[in-house]
Amino acid sequence: MGSSFVGPSYGRHKRRPDTHFLYAVHYEDGGSGYVRVPPHLANTDSTQAIREVCREAQSRGELRQGKIASVVPVH
């Protein structure tokens, strides 16, 4: 009576790994923050689309307000 390994279990409930990409947001005043970007946007070279994700995160309160100087992927 053996058990078969189905895959990794994440805590009590099975959950898929996060597929979003992490980007560092640098503000003009020297501050920084992080935002998760969906793969369909991260896999493009569209800086404008990634900045739009940042602006939306600011409007939801997930990122602090302020002028964004740059957004770079975290490796």
Image (cartoon, helix red, strand yellow):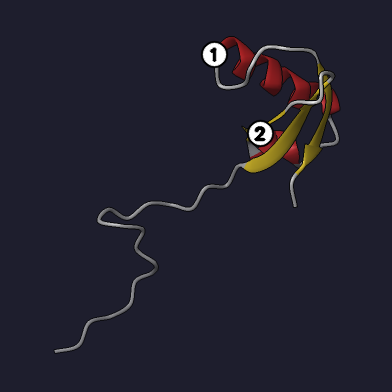
Residue found 60% across the figure and 42% down from its top: 20
Mark 2: which secondary structure?
strand
Q: Residue at x 77, y 42 (%)?
A: 73
Q: Quadrant of the N terminus?
A: bottom left
Distance CA(mark 2)–CA(mark 1): 14 Å
The kind of residue tagged 2 is: Tyr
Q: Nearer the viewer, residue 69 or 54?
A: 69
Q: Mark 1: give few (<14), some (14-19) or many (20+) Cα within 10 Å.
A: few
User: Mark 1: which amino acid?
Assistant: Arg
Q: Report the residue marked by disc 2.
A: 34
Q: Residue furthest bottom?
A: 1
Residue 28 in percent (x, y) is at 84, 19
Residue 46 in which image quadrant: top right
Name which residue lies at 68% across and 22% down: 53
Task: List x then y, in percent, for residue 25.
Answer: 75, 30
| Closer to us: 38 or 10 | 10
Label for residue 60?
A: 1
